[in-house]
Image (spheres, rainbow, N blue to C red):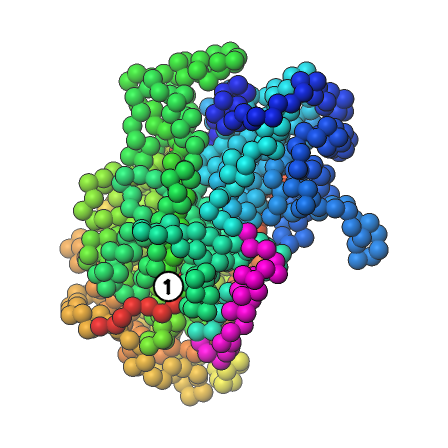
Amino acid sequence: MHNKFIVVSTSLFMEYYVPPVTEKRNENLSNILKGVPVASGRETAMYTPIVNALNKNKICSDFTFVSTHTRGDPSETSKEAPDIGLYPKDRAPRASQGPDGHPQAPATDWSFVELCIECKTGSDPFNDREPDFVSKSDEGKKILGQILSYIELMFRRQQRMCIFLVLILGKMCRIIRFDRSGAVVTQAFNYKTNGGVLIEFLWRYARWDRSTRGHDPSATLILPGSELAEAMVARAKKDKDPKKEEDYVRQLFQESLDKHWSWWKLRVDCKGDARHFVVGKPNFIAPGVAGRGTRGFVALDEANLNGPFYYLKDAWRVSSRHIDKEGTTLCYLNKKDVPYVPMLECHGDVSKAQVTKTQDLWKDLHKDDKLPEADTKPEAKTKPEEGKTRPKEGKNQLEERTKAEAQPEEKKTCPFKKHKHYRIVVREVGQKMTKFLHSRQLVYALRCCIFAHSEAYRHGVIHRDISAGNVLLYYHQDDGWCGLLNDWELSKQTDSNTPQGRQLDRTGTWQFLSVSALDNPSKEIEIEDELESFFHVLLFFAIRFLHHNCVLVGPFMHKYFDDYDIGDGKYVCGPKKASCMKNGAITLRSGTKAVPDVALTFCWPSLKSTAGLDDAASPSHPLNYIFSTILGWIKSHYALIQSPGNGTAARPSQSKAADGFRAHGVYGDLRFIDETRGRKTTNRSLAPFDTDDARKHEAMAENLRSHDAILDLLKTVLTSPEYIWPDNEKTPDKLPKEGHKPKADPDAASVNMRKGGSMHGNVPATGSSLKRGSEHIEQPANPETPPKRAKSSKRKSGRKGHKRS
């Protein structure tokens, strides 16, 4: 939520977002909260008086206010609990008896809470005089992180277009409206002496229809025990056969029918006619408030509940004339018979009305400025020019500020993106790549994805978001387990006329972007960048689940994938990744100055656990040759961009497997469909060599300028008997469950790689509210939009694929 807030007067907020209702309220109700105690540090004393006053005076008829501050939602791992929640009367939480027989206070229910009221007596999380309107105090940041956690939980559990929240700060109050573009906040007002604003807002809110309150009218709640719900349960049990590889799809759907989550019938507005799909709990939820808000569901067509399973992706896409809908891109790739990509079933925007509105208010406030398109400038200014002073804040605070900051020599760029609600359905339902069985399957699946990338590029489309969550495993009825290159919403036509960038921030996922792309935010993504990203993805899975000589995996992953540096006032690539790519080696710290750093080396499982042989008999792991070769290419690539390096690692020797090792003995079991498409194998030099000669660097770097070399390399290592692959090598995940937060890094929370978080493709772990502030207010404050660190794993998809040639 960096640079995603606007503060406006209460009158402007009411005009834009709080339409009047026909039922008028009694003016005498304006001061019913006058007696609320506001003693510093005694927030709990505020809850009961507020709840009683609002309920007694029937400010929100058909609803009831409930104090839930002591208990979070039992169905969530998060313990977040808003002080007060507004609920429909038939859904209001009630006190109950606990397992020990003692009474329990009402628990939060994120599935049905309409609106949250948070009470504080300390710092205000907003500062009207700051350029980004956010308080720089530690307590203010914590409070903002807390309320953003509430909004995130409501967005993930409900079908919402926007959400309102009331923030009470002692005797002052702010009302906030959130959508996927950002948030609009009222100036603080005294609800004790000027209570009419708050009471009028709540009065109107309770008398609006569901759509006006922010609920999505295209989503219909499926009631427990209804005929449709029972049909979903029956379908989840039909054709159950755990012995079949493809049974994982049915299992995923069965797991989604969680009785603690709401089930929905979702409308997809396709061309010609609408279709309806039924879903349970999403198996992927993107973290955060502003942004696409992607959720993924295993789905059934309501018109054919006994038919195949589908994967439904619900997101708020960036609306721009320069960006194609993901379904449009998939339709094109399907027509071109590009393999290993999802097969489109249907897609469409969810009615014309479901568009974010925050960006429109910003543009209205800056209508006298000459504004460029928000998606054609790579960076937005977030700090005022030096020497500018803030005018005194008043009724026309924003209008005055706009004039004071007007800079005729520069154009202002809207920092708020326009998002449209969008749904797409594909035929494949796969699973995350972490489910791979052994390294050979992992490499083969990634090669499938690289081949899909190459075929798409041959037809004029580049993916531009290669990440751990966008490469999936799926089971094809004819070919068995393959890879699937997923999530094409950031793809671009290679002949596009907008190479300067189509959005305000970087395109892609921070952890997997190339060093060059991280150091140059507006850089046009090229093949070299994408192939480097595939390498980062391979490393990401291999170091977590295979045997190697890295002892401290958590710290390594933080430094390599999440870390960053500051260059020219911008976030750039962290030093660890940059050093590894430019030196052509993944190095591990020895821990002592007397011992030099060592290279990351993959190895076979302990012989004691296999055949009882000595470790010396272990053959070299094929991944070592793959890594050294690709790193040699990458090193030469950066040597040509900057200065020559110190040479590359020599090809490691390959030995035959010793007796007793469990290894793959069949090398014709993998299908390489590129052989049927007439692709010629490369005769380039693939192996790294020890030289700094510019001409040889050019020859090596050439291997990254097309897909041929890496496809040939992986095919050779996968199929040649010279390379022996272990079969029983996969280990439990080495990434610590609690993630890794370096003690010396005060900003580690903003880049924390938490298990269960975005890096794992699961629902993000929402921790204690006072520990989440910096995850939403990315630190340190910087003139540039902070790097994306929360999108790296997407949906889990894959089912019956394409017709093979």
Q: Which of the 4 image quadrants contains residue 164?
A: top right
Q: Secondary structure at mark 1?
A: loop
* Vertical arrangement, residue 724 with respect to residue 369, above or below: below
* Vertical arrangement, residue 254 with respect to residue 655, above or below: above
Q: Is residue 458 left or right of residue 361?
A: left
Towards the viewer: 332 or 387:
332
* Vertical arrangement, residue 657 with respect to residue 565, above or below: below
Q: Residue at x 37, y 29 (%)?
A: 414
> Which residue in the protein does label 1 denote?
427
Residue at the right extreme of this rendering: 101
Assess whether residue 510 is covered by the magenta stretch: no
Assess whether residue 240 is covered by the magenta stretch: yes
Rate crowding at label 1 as few (under 14), some (14 to 19) or many (20 or more) other CA atoms within 10 Å: many
Q: Picture coordinates of residue 674 (x, y %)?
A: 22, 70
Q: Picture coordinates of residue 569 (x, y %)?
A: 39, 32
Q: Picture coordinates of residue 597 (x, y %)?
A: 43, 58
Magenta residues (range): 221-245
Q: Which of the 4 image quadrants contains residue 670?
A: bottom left
Towards the viewer: 789 or 98:
98
Q: Residue at x 42, y 39 (%)?
A: 354
Kindly tell me whether residue 775 is visible in this rendering: no
Q: Amino acid at mark 1?
A: Arg
Q: Is residue 688 left or right of residue 47?
A: left
Q: Residue at x 79, y 54 (%)?
A: 98
For the image shown, how many numbered marks are present on the structure? 1
Quarter of the image where the C terminus is located: bottom left
